[in-house]
Image (spheres, rainbow, N blue to C red):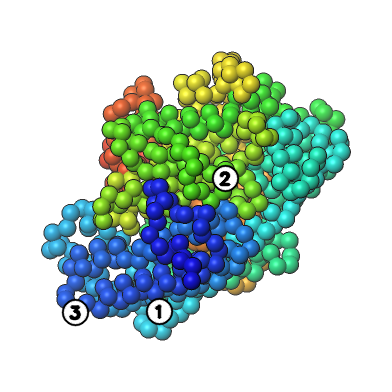
Amino acid sequence: MTVNPLLSDWTTPFDLPPFETIAPEHFEEAFDAAMAEAKADTDRIADQEVAPTFENTIVALETSGKTLTKVARTFFNLTGAHTNEALQKIERDVAPKLAKHSSEMLLNSRLYGRIAALWDQRDSLDLNSEDARVLERYQKMFQRAGAGLDDAGKARMADISQRLATLGTSFSQNVLKDESDYQLVLETEEDRAGLPDFLLTSAAEAANERGLDSKHVITLSRSSIEPFLQFSTNRRLREEAFKAWSARGENGGQTDNRAIISETLKLRDEKARMLGFKNFAEFKLDDTMAKTPDNVRGLLVKVWEPAVAQAREEEAKLADMARNAGENHSIEAWDWRFYSEKVRKAEHDLDETELKPYLQLENIIQAAFDTATRLFGLTFKELKDMPVYHPDVRVFEVLGKDGNHVGLFLGDYFARSSKRSGAWMSAFRSQHRLEGDVTPIIVNVMNFSKGAKGEATLLTFDDARTLFHEFGHGLHGLLSNVTYPIISGTSVSRDFVELPSQLYEHWLSQPEVLSKYAVHYKTGEPMPEALLDKLLAAANFNQGFATVEYTASALIDLELHQLEDPAELDVAAFEKEELGKIGMPQAITMRHRIPHFQHVFSGDGYAAGYYSYMWSEVMDADAFEAFEEKGNVFDPETAGKLLTYIYSAGGRQDPEAAYLAFRGRAPRIDALLEKRGFAA
C-alpha cells in the first residue's frame, strides 16, 4: 500500500507540505486517522485519575491533535486557493465530520470538569500572565461551545454545529461556482470600447486560460470586473456584468444560497438562545471588544450619517458629468465607477490608466517588505524550487534583524478559477514555543489579474492597498512571539484582528515609500512628483461611496443576526426593507450582498462581526497618529512598542489592554472620521 504523505514525517525544506506527492484521496484516509488520534489524545487527558493541573490538562490539550492540525491546515489552504471537484467533494464530506469531532471534545463533560476546576482555583495556581490568559480562553471556549449544558442540550448543540459546517461549505462552493462559471466574452470593438491596454491585456490572459485564444474575457474577480465597470463605455455590457456580479448566490438552481442563509440564521439563533443569549449577535459580541450590538450600531451610525451625506454629493457630481456628456439617464450602480473615474479626472487630473504603469506587482511586494525591514528589522530572501501547491506561488524566507530564521512567507497573487474570490492571510503552521521553537509558515492569497507572459503585472492603487493589508496580517502571524498555539499570531478578538492589517496600509501612502517603489514599468522612471501629489490629494475621493457600501453591509449583518424569526426570512425582501430604513442611496449596492456574503455565511468568523473592520479602523487611524506625532513614520521607539504590544503579542492579553500599552490611552473615533475625510 502506498504511504500516505499526510501521515508521514515531512522531509521537505522547512517542513512545507509535500504538495507534489499529495493527491485528493490522501485526505480522506488522513482525516480519519488524524481525528482518531486526536480523539485518543483528548480521551487520555479527560480520563486521567490524577487531579487536574495546568500542565496535565491545558498544556496537554495545546500539544494534542498535531496530525489533525497539520492535515486540516494543508487541506483548507488548498480548498481556498487551488481547489478542484475532488477536493470539493471531500470538503463537503469532511466538514460535518470535523464539526462532530470538535463537538465531542468541547462537550466532553470530564474534560470540561478538569478545566472548570482549574478555573475555580486560578488564583492559587501561581500562573504567569500568559498561562492565565490561556486558561481563560479555554474556559470561555468550552462554555461558549455548550459544555455547561445538560446531555440533551449537548446533543442538540453537536447536531447544530455539524449542520452549520455543511451549510457553510455549500455556501462557499456555490459562490465559487457562480464566479467561475461566468465569463463576459468581448467579441467586437464595441464590446471593448473604452478599455485601457492594461485591462485588455489581463482580459486576453483570462481568455487564454479558458481556451478562448484571440478573445478577451471579463471575469467576476474583483480585479477584472471593477476596472471594466470603471472604463467600459458600453453601458449595456456594464449593466450585464454588474448584475452578474451582484447576483452571485441567488441565480436559482443548485447554487442558490437563499435557503442556506435562512437555515444558517435559524440554527445560529437557536444556539445563542440555548447558551442564554437573546440572539446570535449578542452571543457573538459578548467575546469581543465591542461587547454589545448597541455599541456596534452606535459606531456604524456615527459614520453612516456623514458618509451618506457625502455619497449624495458625489452622486450629484456624477449626474452632472453624465448630463454634460449628453446622457439623460439616472446614475445606476453600474454607472458609479464609470462616471466616478471621469469626475476624479476632472477634479484631480488623475485617472487609473495614468497611475497603473507605476504600480508593478513586483515593486509593491518589495515596498511591503522594505516597510517591514524599516519598522521591524526583517529581511526577505526568495527561495526557488520549494514545494508549492501551484506554480504561481512564491516562497520567501523571513529573517530577523539578527539574521536568524523567523518563518516562511508564501505569496499567491494571481486570480484563477480554482481560487475563491477576495484576498486573505492564512497559516500552514503557527508560531509557538511549547515543543521547541516552532516557526510560522504564513501565506497571503490575492486575486490580481495577471499580466501577459513576459510582461509586468500592474495593479490599481486599491490592489496595492490590498497587498499591504494582507501583508499586515501576514506580519501578525510571522512576528508572533508566544508560548501557546491558542493565542498565536492572529488568534485575537475578531474586532482587533484587523488592526495590524489596516494599520499597515498607511505606509503605502507615504511619499518616501511611493517615491522609491512607484516607478514606471517600462522606463524605470519614478512616479512624477506632480502625479504623486495628485494621488495623495485624491486619497479621500469617492470616500462617501466606499464608506456607504461597506457600512451598509455591516449594518445588514448586525440586523440579520438579531432577527426574532430567521426561519421566515425572505432574503431579497429583507435586504430591500433594511436598506430602505437606513436611507441607502439607490445608486450604491452593498459591498457584499447577502447571497454571496462569504465573510458571514461561509463560516461564522465574521458573522455579526463584519463591523470589525471599522472598529479596528478607529484604532488604526489613531495608532498611525502615534508615528506622525513623532515626525517620523518609521520612528524606532514607536515601532518597538508596536512590535511588542501588537504584532508579536498574539492574544497574550486583553485587546483593550494591548492597545493602551501601545498608545498610552484609548483610541479616538475622531481619528477615523478625519482619515475618511468626514468632519469630526
Judging depth in this view, the residue of 613 and 488 nearest the camera is 488
Which mark, by number, is residue 391? 2
Q: How many marks?
A: 3
Q: Which secondary structure, mark 2?
A: loop
**Label 3 environment density (alpha carbons within 10 Å; few <14, some 14–19, many ≥20):** few
Q: Work out whether 488 lies above or below 540.
A: below
CA–CA distance between discs 1 and 2? 45 Å
Q: Work out whether 309 lies above or below 78.
A: above
Judging depth in this view, the residue of 289 and 157 nearest the camera is 157
Determine which residue is flagged by label 3: 49
Q: Would residue 225 appear left or right of 427 to someone viewing this image?
A: right
- Residue type indicated by callout 3: Glu
Determine which residue is flagged by label 1: 154
Q: Residue at coordinates 53% horizontally, 51% vertically from top-left?
A: 389
Judging depth in this view, the residue of 489 and 430 nearest the camera is 430
Q: Residue at coordinates 81% horizontally, 36% vertically from top-left?
A: 192
Q: Residue at coordinates 26% horizontally, 66% vertically from top-left?
A: 60
Q: Which secondary structure, mark 3?
A: loop
Q: Earlier in the sequence, mark 2 or mark 3?
A: 3
Give the image quarter of residue 255.
bottom right
Q: Are marks 1 and 3 in contact (CB under 8 Å)?
A: no
CA–CA distance between discs 2 and 3? 52 Å
- Residue type indicated by callout 2: Pro
Give the image quarter of residue 458.
top right
Which mark, by number, is residue 350? none
> Visible in this render: residue 493?
no
Q: Work out whether 548 lies above or below 118.
A: above
Q: Would residue 510 appear left or right of 317 to someone viewing this image?
A: left
**Label 1 environment density (alpha carbons within 10 Å; few <14, some 14–19, many ≥20):** many
CA–CA distance between discs 1 and 3? 24 Å
Q: Residue at coordinates 49% horizontally, 42% vertically from top-left?
A: 385
Q: Would residue 465 appear left or right of 339 to someone viewing this image?
A: left
